[in-house]
């Protein structure tokens, strides 16, 4: 089984093409998942995907940054393989044809090469459960539904033991050729990935340790500089523009999950630029090695997330797919992830005031909710391969399946049966 | 650190502090402003007579409170509405996005509403009248209606509540669990006490902060009608002592509810089993008809525990064997049942950020029964809307599978199952119809009395 990668392609939109592109994205969205431009379910291993436009802005020094089109996907396997897959969709020409430098009438190979050439690397990522492929999500969800239906039978005896019910269900699953896979353990992620992650697990702290004599004084100076400056960094104030809020909300709450896409400038100066990089490095490390299985610091509602620097580090995009409403997502942020968010987002221009990078910030409920709303980008096209399944439900289906694996037979049948 | 902030009860409207339980008759008048200036002068006069939240003397034979929609604020202030009201209030309950969020779609969509939707005259002002006798109420209604007509206000709808009863129309004791606002004398240490800012603007909420609210320069309030911003900014606080009032007319399909429950719990030969029917309905509600909670008395109703409210879920019933995970009361107020760490103080702390004070009254006509659902909250998004969207109507609430609230949830997009956990195996019911439909609704601002006077004065200057 492959691991999951985050694909990001971004290209500037040519002058005069923006209106047509915006219109195209809306038509694409209206047609749904299987639209004529990109047939998302046909692409292999795509959990989530989105397309949106970043409007033209001026950076902190007043230099213009042209409008751009961004494509993102959370996929099984390598990003390059996904782009090769995507390049078989002829509709890609209509989308990226609006972008500067897109080749005329490209072959699929040329398309793939152009897309690959416009990739952005995430500085940090989060995957709800590393190594759980799309096929496994769908299979386990189906198993879960089938088992629930077996227990719905009106003639089901009501006097058996939990172990008895479990073996009854296990017999039926074994007898079904379309469910027999449940008794075999899912393949783990491939060896090359595991080796790479193990090296990363050790190498990052090792490098930090070796460089400690240099890094520590720098870090102390950096933190003190930030401590002095954060008291006067300008905060954004006032309510969110209603029109902007409505533009974002138009694309929210259509499914059990939602997309979140936000962009902002990094505060000026080398210290903030470095602080952002270090914070994202630390976040990525924590996500890969501590939070690679069913929760991010206790928050179970995030499927995928990524933090992508762009415009040479002047800006960062945060994009995620999460369960429930934006309000509940932000409440989780404030109640449970405030420190981690502060560490990263407080390097962003306009963020609510922090103290020592970690404190305050997201704890300012009104200021923080407004900040995030203000920086959100309408996610015009968003695809979910399992829009009805919140992440904890996907996990629940995996726990149900685990009950059929070799060796699971004797442990807590009552607890297992209560999952159904 | 310090005790709760002292409450300026004399400047709050009475509904914030009490449900007027001693005044069993009520009518709610929904008004449309035709002539802004005239209406402002009347609302200004009403500000002198509305019932305050002061604890003494107790309310006499009648009570009156006044609330405004965002459009109403705009009309009464001649387009000079202060900014800083929440987005939810300003865009209103019937906006396209909010309808999707609240589940008000298809046959619950605002276009079908009897009031508050796009097909009826916009509601600007709500006058809530309560009285100890029907005659007293009639006098109040007649007087307000006559004044309204004389001062450029038109009645869009008159909502007459039924005489106050313990049971709601499905037959269950209602309104037992109410959060206690910190600072009120009843709110002792411990118990279900929630910081005042969750229910009244201008006070500290459960985050220790003051929820967003309109602040205006002190210079715009030369008459000093408004209290100052308690954060000391020097601004005058239009929000302080006021709050948001949610009103939704909910039609309850009483026959449909009991028919379905009767069929789902029938004997094998198809005849209704009265005891089983009551038991299944109680499983769906989470309390017995008397109000006794299932977690405390899972096997049979116990009227002695009719008002019992000092219980939690996780400690006694983590799997929902007594009170199902999906039961109405366990969804609308999960207490200690949710992440993080169910059963912990952290879980309770999160729960305290999603509470509302309920002030609804039942109604009954020849053809229909239901509830004028009303609740008070300082943050519509985090309190009322969150409960409605993420607890009541989320089909995957707390690991349920395709189950909205069995009693009041919507079924527009599935959500039609209900599971009663059991040993060794659960019972899952399917094909639940929708028993409750929304027939009208709006978000109101229930201002502090000084702020009501201030807003009305803006339309005159």
Image (spheres, rainbow, N blue to C red):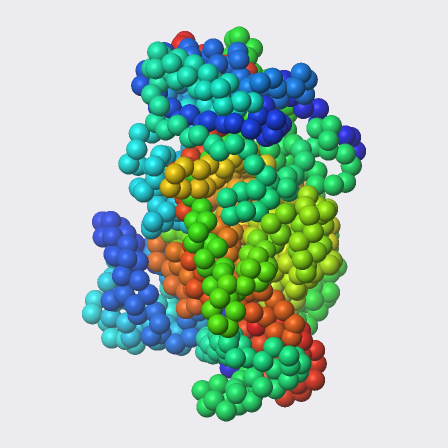
Quarter location, residue A40:
bottom left
Image coordinates for residue A71, horizontal then vertical, percent: 37, 61
Q: Find the residue positioned furthest to the left.
A: A105
Quarter location, residue B251:
top left
Quarter location, residue A36:
bottom left
From the viewer's perspective, tell me whether residue A128 is left or right of residue A46.
right
Residue A396 is at least partly visible in this image: no
Front-most of B180 and B249?
B249
Residue A204 is at least partly visible in this image: yes
Q: Residue at 31%, 62% (x, y): give it.
A: A32
Q: Quadrant of the N terminus of chain B?
A: top right
From the viewer's perspective, tell me whether residue A74 is left or right of residue B352.
left
Q: Residue at 72%, 66% (x, y): give it.
A: A210
Front-most of A208 and B411?
B411
Image coordinates for residue A243, horizontal then vertical, percent: 37, 38
Quick check: A296 above or below A145? above
Image coordinates for residue A3, horizontal then vertical, percent: 52, 76
Front-most of B219 and B108?
B108
From the viewer's perspective, tell me whether residue A17 is left or right of residue A239.
left
Front-most of B290 and B460?
B290
Q: Quadrant of the C terminus of chain B?
A: top left
Image coordinates for residue B75, horizontal then vertical, percent: 37, 21
Q: Residue at 24%, 49% (x, y): give it.
A: A19
Quick check: B56 above or below A148? above
Count the marks: how many? 0
Quick check: B212 above or below A68? above
């Amino acid at each position: 089984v492959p691991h999951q990668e985050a694909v990001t392609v971004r290209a500037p939109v040519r002058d005069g093409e923006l209106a047509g592109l915006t219109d195209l994205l809306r038509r694409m969205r209206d047609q749904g998942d299987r639209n004529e431009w990109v047939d998302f379910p046909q692409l292999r291993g795509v959990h989530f995907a989105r397309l949106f436009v970043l409007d033209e802005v001026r950076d902190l020094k007043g230099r213009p940054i042209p409008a751009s089109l961004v494509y993102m996907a959370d996929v099984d396997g390598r990003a390059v393989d996904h782009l090769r897959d995507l390049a078989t969709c002829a509709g890609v020409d209509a989308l990226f044809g609006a972008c500067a430098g897109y080749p005329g009438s490209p072959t699929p190979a040329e398309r793939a090469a152009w897309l690959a050439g416009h990739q952005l690397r995430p500085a940090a990522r989060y995957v709800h459960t590393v190594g759980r492929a799309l096929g496994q999500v769908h299979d386990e969800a189906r198993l879960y539904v089938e088992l629930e239906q077996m227990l719905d039978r009106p003639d089901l005896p009501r006097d058996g033991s939990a172990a008895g019910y479990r073996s009854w269900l296990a017999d039926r699953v074994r007898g079904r050729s379309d469910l027999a896979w449940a008794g075999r353990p899912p393949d783990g992620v491939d060896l090359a990935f595991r080796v790479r992650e193990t090296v990363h697990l050790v190498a990052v702290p090792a490098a930090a340790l070796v460089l400690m004599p240099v890094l520590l004084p720098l870090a102390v100076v950096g933190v003190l500089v930030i401590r002095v400056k954060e008291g006067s960094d300008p905060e954004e104030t006032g309510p969110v523009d209603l029109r902007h809020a409505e533009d974002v909300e138009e694309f929210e709450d259509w499914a059990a999950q939602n997309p979140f896409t936000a962009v902002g400038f990094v505060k000026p100066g080398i210290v903030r630029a470095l602080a952002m990089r270090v914070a994202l490095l630390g976040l990525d490390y924590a996500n890969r090695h501590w939070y690679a299985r069913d929760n991010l610091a206790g928050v179970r509602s995030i499927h995928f997330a990524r933090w992508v620097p762009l415009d040479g580090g002047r800006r960062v995009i945060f994009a995620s797919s999460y369960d429930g409403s934006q309000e509940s997502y932000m409440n989780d942020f404030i109640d449970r992830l405030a420190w981690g968010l502060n560490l990263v987002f407080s390097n962003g221009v306009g963020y609510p005031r922090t103290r020592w990078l970690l404190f305050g910030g997201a704890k300012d409920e009104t200021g923080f909710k407004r900040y995030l709303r203000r920086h959100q980008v309408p996610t015009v096209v968003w695809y979910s391969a399992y829009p009805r399944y919140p992440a904890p439900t996907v996990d629940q289906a995996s726990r149900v399946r685990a009950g059929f694996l070799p060796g699971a037979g004797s442990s807590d049948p009552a607890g297992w049966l209560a999952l159904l | 650190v310090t005790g709760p902030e002292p409450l300026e009860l004399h400047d709050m409207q009475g509904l914030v502090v009490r449900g007027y339980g001693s005044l069993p008759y009520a009518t709610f008048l929904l008004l449309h402003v035709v002539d802004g200036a005239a209406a402002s002068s009347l609302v200004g006069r009403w500000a002198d007579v509305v019932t305050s939240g002061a604890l003494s003397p107790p309310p006499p034979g009648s009570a009156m409170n006044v609330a405004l929609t965002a459009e109403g604020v705009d009309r009464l202030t001649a387009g000079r509405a202060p900014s800083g009201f929440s987005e939810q209030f300003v865009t209103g309950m019937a906006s396209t996005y909010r309808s999707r969020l609240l589940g008000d779609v298809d046959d619950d969509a605002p276009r079908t509403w009897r009031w508050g939707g796009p097909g009826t005259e916009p509601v600007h002002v709500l006058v809530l009248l309560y009285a100890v006798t029907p005659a007293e109420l009639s006098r109040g209604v007649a007087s307000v209606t006559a004044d309204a007509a004389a001062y450029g206000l038109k009645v869009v709808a008159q909502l007459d509540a039924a005489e106050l009863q313990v049971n709601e129309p499905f037959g269950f004791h209602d309104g037992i669990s109410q959060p206690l606002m910190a600072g009120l004398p009843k709110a002792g240490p411990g118990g279900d006490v929630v910081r005042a800012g969750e229910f009244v603007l201008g006070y500290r909420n459960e985050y220790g902060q003051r929820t967003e609210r309109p602040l205006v320069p002190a210079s715009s309030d030369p008459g000093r009608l408004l209290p100052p911003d308690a954060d000391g900014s020097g601004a005058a606080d239009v929000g302080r002592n006021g709050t948001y009032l949610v009103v939704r007319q909910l039609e309850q399909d009483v026959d449909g509810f009991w028919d379905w429950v009767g069929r789902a719990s029938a004997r094998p030969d198809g005849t209704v089993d009265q005891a089983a029917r009551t038991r299944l309905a109680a499983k769906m509600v989470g309390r017995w008809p008397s109000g006794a909670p299932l977690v405390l008395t899972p096997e049979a109703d116990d009227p002695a525990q009719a008002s019992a409210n000092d219980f939690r879920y996780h400690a006694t019933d983590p799997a929902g064997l007594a009170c199902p995970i999906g039961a109405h009361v366990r969804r609308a107020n999960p207490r200690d049942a949710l992440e993080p760490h169910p059963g912990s103080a952290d879980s309770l702390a999160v729960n305290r950020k999603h509470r509302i004070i309920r002030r609804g009254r039942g109604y009954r006509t020849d053809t229909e029964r239901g509830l004028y659902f009303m609740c008070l909250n300082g943050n519509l998004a985090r309190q009322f809307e969150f409960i409605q969207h993420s607890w009541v109507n989320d089909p995957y609430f707390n690991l349920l599978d395709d189950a909205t609230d069995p009693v009041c949830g919507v079924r527009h997009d599935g959500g039609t199952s209900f599971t009663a956990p059991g040993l060794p195996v659960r019972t899952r019911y399917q094909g639940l119809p929708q028993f409750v439909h929304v027939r009208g609704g709006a978000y109101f601002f229930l201002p502090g009395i000084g702020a009501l006077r201030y807003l009305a004065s803006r339309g005159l200057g």
